[in-house]
Image: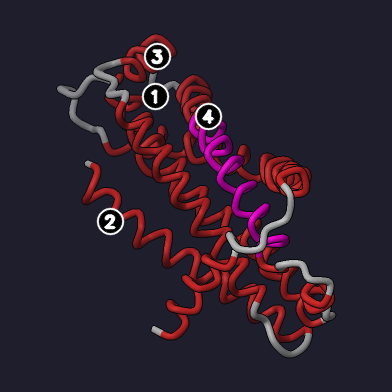
Amino acid sequence: METIGKYFIFLGSLFVNRESFKTYFKLTIDECVSIGIGSIFLVALVAFFIGAVTTIQTAYNLVSPLIPNYVISLVVRDMTILELAPTIIAVIYAGKVGSSMASGLGTMRISEQIDALQVMGINSASYLVLPKILGSLLMYPMLVIIAGLLSIVGGYLAGLLTGVITPTQYVYGIRFDFNEYTVTFALIKSFVFAFLVASISSFKGYYTTGGALEVGRASTSAVTQSVIAILLADYLLAQLLL
């Protein structure tokens, strides 16, 4: 409970004694470039193969001749939008971006750079962390959209190459009985996951104490706690919004 209380106090400290809008704008753009460009290759690669594997495994399990082939792509579409793109990519996002945020802030803490900012009268938590959270909120939903598109493309190519479904059947299944709300649900999840990963990782890194070994522990702890928070939020959002 003490840690949870400290976490919320930390979040509240981000909005007091802030710097100018121009300063935050430049820092946020830098974080967007770092998060977006640094993550897009891994996200694209994972999403593409998730779609391909989902197509092949779904086809393997649909053994009844009474079930039309277009159900394969329908399953791929719904699994991609509802779970694979926002949630599985969030776990990878926590491992890559979250650990980077925690280790970066932890290194600044043990090298006393954060203390130097405080001595200069700058709210170091707001100056260093708020742009990271804003950058995450802006970039992660875009990564989820890209992941969803590439997952469906991966499924299409896997079906085409293996012959488990024809291109016409695949496209028909993708368009069949499409519910637009699933996209809204995926975007809501992506905003929540982006905030959780950035805030938890920054919190762990900002309060790192000790030396280089503790920075590594803080980074590992940030990823672990971010993944747990993602899974809990995933369950709660599914209960509340579906």
Within 10 Å of the Cα at label 2, are there few (<14), some (14-19), or many (20+) other Cα atoms? Answer: few
Tell me the number on the disc at residue 127: none
Task: Identify the residue shown where x is 46% and y is 39%.
Answer: 53
Give the x, y percent position of residue 154.
53, 29
Within 10 Å of the Cα at label 1, are there few (<14), some (14-19), or many (20+) other Cα atoms? Answer: some
Q: Which residue is mark 2?
A: 236
**Residue 26 picture quarter:** top right
For mark 1, give the secondary structure.
loop
Mark 4 to mark 2 CA distance (whole Å)? 29 Å
Q: Which residues are magenta?
A: 126-148
Q: Which residue is mark 1?
A: 164
Q: Nearer the viewer, mark 3 or mark 1?
A: 3
Question: Image check: 64 left or right of 59?
Answer: left
Q: Which residue is mark 4?
A: 154
The stretch drawn in magenta includes residue 226: no
Three-letter residue code for mark 3: Val
Mark 3 to mark 2 CA distance (whole Å)? 32 Å
Display colour scheme: secondary structure
Mark 3 to mark 1 CA distance (whole Å)? 14 Å
Q: Which residue is mark 3?
A: 171
Mark 1 to mark 4 CA distance (whole Å)? 14 Å
Three-letter residue code for mark 2: Leu
